[in-house]
């Protein structure tokens, strides 16, 4: 290529104004691939004032196909390549096109081939065979023609990119709907909504929260409460909005609720979510970039799809609260059978003991869940049920005479048999009720625990003398948790042990009374939750 060719290729035909200062992230990335350095210089000179949709170019230079591949692997968002056909080989440019499309699978980048020797690669066959956007002889490409080619290429790139972003956004919405449908906690669901929204639009999570009208714990409709948050709002679960959120944000949330319309501002968005149960939520997120029309459409579509999720979770938690109240009532019936007229025995039916036992049982289960050995047995539903189900272990005591339960001295053999029958009585009561509910539930799991929590790991327990893994895992967990809790509680026939003494006793019984793996998990939980247990 000669200097005369350069003059022909870049004959000045007009200048377009461009902003003087612009962040690189907002520029169109263009890659010039040519083995002649003059071509790079002249291309930059001619396109120095180029501007399309308020964005100027950012140039990258490669002098061989190998250098171009390195840049393309590093810069994934290059919009246009101005590519020479003949470089280190006569078809180096054409080989690079194949590599971009077939190996790198980059179908968005726009490719403009330039050649000084058009006879070596006929235009018609190149256009048909190589899926490029334009093919120009260097002697034909004036500055105006180059400008026109670049605008057409960028329009095409922008359209393809928009389609791809939309496709990925819809995929994320589908994935989010699938994953969120498995969550049964309002707190986790709302947190998941925030995470998915942040991923869909690429907005930072530093200022994103979900607000509900009314406190879900009391099922009221008064006031505004933070349901979930991230960033600086991350610790505000179930806290009043006005007490912890800056007035500007609170005002936008109120405006969104009052008008029942989404608000999109260059720096933030407030999304109104109305459920079929006439409950109202607002998702507020701030962004370090303006949310364009595509972002807004994806946000609105996502929030529309998950509105039913809020209602389902709310209904689920209300049903769960009713179940927990039922379980607590049943547990109190069993504990009430223990009660003696002495003050020391009164602790047995106290709600604090139920919470302590439930917390310890769930803590042990969650510790085991981290171990591969138990991962196939323990799942999220099990973790959600084991705590409340554990407090039903002694429900069968309602069938045991009070005189036997409160006897301060040793039991006779007939009395012992009656006492041990509480395992079967509790299992029968809970099992019958649990069958009326589909799937794993508090009552069904409670029946399993009630029946087997007095089985010993070495096979010397009752009522069936099961051993090792024959004993249901839930019963093995509760056996440890209940024994520890019993040891640190006063009983008619002995005073409470210290927590240290009780822990030592539990560890001494590993392998005989208790599963050693569960004792080890118990030890870890006690070490981290000593104050509450």
Image: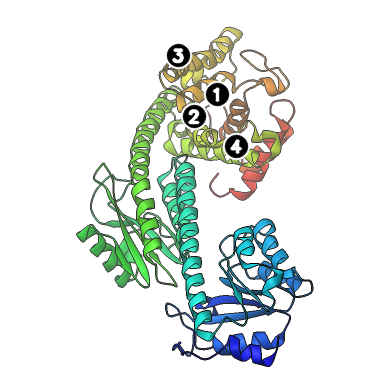
Residue, far right: 88
Residue, far top: 414
Residue 449 numbered mark, or none: 1
Circle 2: element type: helix
Distance Cα–Cα, label 4 vs label 1: 14 Å
Distance Cα–Cα, label 3 vs label 1: 17 Å
Residue 504 appears in the figure? no
Residue receiving disc 4: 365
Query: Which of the pair 72/144 is nearer the observer?
Result: 144
Please state if 345 lies on the left or on the right of 499 as rendered: left
Q: Are marks 1 and 2 in contact (CB under 8 Å)?
A: yes
Residue receiving disc 2: 389
Circle 4: element type: helix
Query: Which of the pair 237/57 is nearer the observer?
Result: 57
Query: Which of the pair 476/175 is nearer the observer?
Result: 175
Residue 514 appears in the figure? yes
Circle 3: element type: helix
Residue receiving disc 3: 399
Which circle's residue, 3 or 1, is located before the other in the chain? 3
Which circle's residue, 4 or 2, is located before the other in the chain? 4
Distance Cα–Cα, label 4 vs label 2: 12 Å
Circle 1: element type: helix
Residue 290 position, x and y percent, is 40, 71
Q: Nearer the viewer, mark 4 or mark 3?
A: 4
The way the protein has been coloured in the rendering is rainbow
Which circle's residue, 3 or 2, is located before the other in the chain? 2
Q: Are marks 4 and 3 in contact (CB under 8 Å)?
A: no
Q: Nearer the viewer, mark 3 or mark 1?
A: 1
Residue 409 position, x and y percent, is 57, 19
């Amino acid at each position: 290529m000669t200097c005369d060719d350069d003059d022909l290729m870049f004959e000045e035909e007009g200048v377009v104004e461009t902003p003087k200062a612009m962040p690189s992230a907002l520029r169109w990335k263009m890659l010039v691939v040519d083995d002649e350095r003059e071509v790079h210089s002249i291309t930059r000179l001619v396109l120095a004032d180029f501007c399309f949709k308020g964005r100027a170019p950012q140039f990258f230079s490669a002098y061989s196909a190998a250098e171009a591949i390195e840049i393309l692997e590093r810069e994934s968002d290059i919009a246009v390549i101005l590519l020479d056909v003949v470089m280190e080989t006569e078809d180096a440019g054409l080989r690079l096109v194949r590599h971009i499309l077939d190996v790198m699978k980059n179908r968005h980048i726009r490719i403009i081939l330039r050649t000084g020797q058009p006879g070596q690669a006929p235009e018609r066959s190149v256009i048909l065979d190589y899926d490029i956007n334009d093919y120009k002889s260097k002697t034909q490409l004036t500055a105006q023609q180059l400008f026109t080619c670049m605008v057409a290429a960028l329009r095409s790139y922008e359209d393809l990119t928009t389609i791809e972003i939309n496709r990925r956004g819809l995929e994320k919405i589908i994935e989010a709907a699938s994953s969120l449908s498995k969550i049964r906690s309002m707190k986790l669901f709302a947190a998941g909504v925030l995470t998915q929204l942040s991923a869909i639009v690429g907005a930072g999570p530093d200022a994103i929260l979900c607000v509900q009208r009314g406190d879900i714990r009391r099922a009221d409709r008064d006031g505004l409460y933070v349901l979930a948050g991230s960033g600086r709002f991350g610790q505000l679960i179930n806290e009043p909005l006005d007490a912890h959120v800056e007035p500007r944000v609170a005002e936008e949330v109120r405006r969104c609720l009052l008008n029942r319309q989404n608000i999109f501002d260059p720096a933030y968005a407030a999304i109104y979510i109305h459920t079929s149960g006439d409950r109202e939520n607002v998702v507020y997120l701030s962004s370090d970039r303006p949310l364009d029309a595509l972002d807004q459409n994806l946000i609105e579509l996502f929030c529309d799809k998950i509105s039913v999720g809020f209602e389902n979770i709310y209904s689920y938690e209300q049903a769960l609260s009713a179940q927990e109240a039922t379980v607590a009532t049943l547990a109190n019936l069993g504990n009430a059978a223990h009660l003696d007229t002495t003050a020391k025995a009164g602790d047995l039916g106290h709600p604090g003991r139920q919470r302590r036992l439930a917390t310890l049982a769930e803590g042990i289960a969650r510790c085991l869940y981290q171990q591969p050995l138990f991962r196939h047995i323990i799942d999220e539903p099990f973790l959600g049920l084991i705590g409340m189900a554990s407090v039903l272990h002694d429900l069968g005591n309602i069938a045991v005479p009070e005189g036997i339960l409160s006897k301060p001295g040793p039991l006779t053999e007939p009395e012992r048999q009656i006492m041990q029958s509480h395992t079967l009585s509790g299992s029968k009561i809970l099992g019958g009720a649990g069958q009326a509910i589909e799937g794993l539930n508090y009552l069904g799991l409670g029946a399993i625990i009630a029946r087997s929590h007095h089985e010993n790991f070495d096979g010397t327990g009752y009522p069936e003398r099961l051993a090792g893994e024959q004993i249901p895992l839930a019963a093995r967990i509760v056996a440890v948790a209940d024994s520890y809790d019993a040891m640190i509680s006063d009983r008619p026939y002995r005073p409470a042990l210290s927590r240290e003494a009780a822990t030592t006793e539990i560890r001494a019984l590993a392998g005989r009374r208790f599963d050693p793996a569960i004792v080890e998990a118990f030890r870890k939980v006690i070490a981290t939750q000593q104050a509450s247990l």
